[in-house]
Image (cartoon, rainbow, N blue to C red):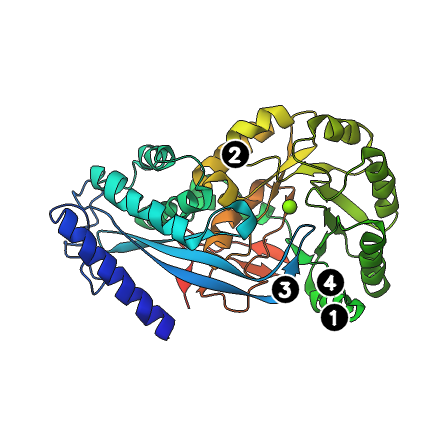
Amino acid sequence: MSDRRSFLKTAGALVAGAALLKPSRLFAVQADGNSSQEQSGSFSSKGAFALSWKPFTGQLKYSFSISTNTRSSTPIILTELRWQGLVGYGEASMPPYLGESQASVDAFLQRVAAEVLPRFDDPFRMEDILSEVDRLAPGNCAAKASVDIALHDLCGKIMGQPWWKIWGFDAADTPCTSYTIGWDASDDIVREKTHEASWAKVLKVKLGRGDYEDKRMITLIREINPDTPIYIDANQGWKNKRYVLDMIHWLKERGIVMIEQPMSKTDLEGHAWLTERSPLPIIADEACQRLVDIPALKGAYHGINIKLMKCTGMREAREMVSLAQALDLKLMMGCMTETSVAISAAAQLAPKMQWADLDGNVLLSNDCFTGMKLVEGKITLNDLPGLGVSPI
Ligand code: MG
C-alpha cells in the first residue's frame, strides 16, 4: 500500500537524518529498515534505539459528536521503535480538544530521539527511559504514550510474552466493550447507528446537549433496542446537580447502568453530592487524567476512566490501576478514536476493569493494524508477544 511505502521512506529519512547527529549511537537501523547489528537476542547488547514516526489520519465511519464538538477524522501519529532487529509499534491519537497535534507530537518525538534515547542501550530500563521522556516537557501526554506503547511492545517481543501475561492477569477476565452511539440531529441516523450496533453487548451514548436532545436520543435507541445495557457519557455537559440526579433516575428506568463525567471536571463538590445520592455509578473521565489526580477523586466519584492518551501510556495506566484498587475506586478503560495499536495496548489492562469502552478502532473506517479482537463484544486478548499487533 502506498501509505506504507511512504512511511518507510519517511522513516528512512528520519533515521538517516538522526545518524548525521550521532552516527555512532543514535540509530542502529538502516534506511531499508533492517538492523545493521547482529540479531543476537542478547538482552545486554549495546544496541541503540531507532525511533521513527509518520502522520496518519483516522477516518471516522460517522461524524462524531460530543457535548462540545463534532468531527469526522482524528489526527494520529504512528511510531516504530527498533532495537536489535525487533520493532515495537506505538501510537498517539490527538482529538483536538486535548490540545495536541501532529506538529506538537512531531516536535516532541524529535526531542525524545535526540535527548533521551541516545542515553540508553537497554529497552528493559523502561522505568528510567519513560521517566526521562515524561520530564522532557509538561503535557504532551499522547506523544509520551506513543513512545511508551512502542517500548512496551518492543519489550514484550523481547520477552516473547503479551503484557496481560507479564502483568499476571487472566485474559478470561476481560469485560465486553461498549460501542459508542454519538449524538446526531437526524432521527434516521440515530436509528441506523442503533441497528448497526446490534452486535454490541453494551452501548455508550453521548449526552449533555440539553434535556430535549438527551431524552430524544435515549428514546430513539430504546425504541429499537430495549434491553442492551447503556453507559452514558455527558462529557461535562450537565450543569445543575439536582437536575442531574433527576435525569439519572429517568435514565435508570431505561436500563442505563453507569454515568461518565456528568458535570464540569472542576466541580468536585457537586460530584461528591451526586455520588452520595446517585442510584448509578458516577465515573470520572475529564477529571482524571493522570495518577496524581486520583487521590482527590476518592469520595467524589465511584470510579475512574483510564485512557492511555491522557495518562502517558501503559506504565502509568498500570500504576493507576493499583492506586484506584487501593482506594476502592472502580475502573473503566477508555480510548480515543485510535487504531488497533493503542486499542490493543489498552486492552492488556482490560482484565482488571469493571467497564471498558475500547471501540476506537471499530469507529475507524481505515484501521491499519490487527490486534485485540472483539468476540461477540467481549475483549479477546491474543497470545502474541507485546501488544499482539501487526500492520495490515
Ligand atoms: Mg468520556
Which label sits on residue 184? 4
Q: Quadrant of the N terminus?
A: bottom left
Residue bearing mark 1: 192
Could you tell me if the residues under marks 4 and 1 are in contact, i.e. CB atoms within 8 Å?
Answer: no
Earlier in the chain: of badge 4 and badge 2, it is 4
Q: Position of residue 176 (x, y in %)?
A: 64, 52
Residue bearing mark 3: 63
The yes-or-no answer for disc 1 within 8 Å of ligand 1 is: no
Q: In the displayed structure, would residue 118 be above or below residue 389?
A: above
Instruction: Give the CA separation, mark 1 to mark 2.
Output: 36 Å
The yes-or-no answer for disc 3 within 8 Å of ligand 1 is: no
**Residue that sits furthest to the left in the current view:** 24
Could you tell me if the residues under marks 4 and 2 are in contact, i.e. CB atoms within 8 Å?
Answer: no
Front-lying residue, 142 or 1: 142
Mark 4: secondary structure? loop
Q: Amino acid at mark 3?
A: Ser
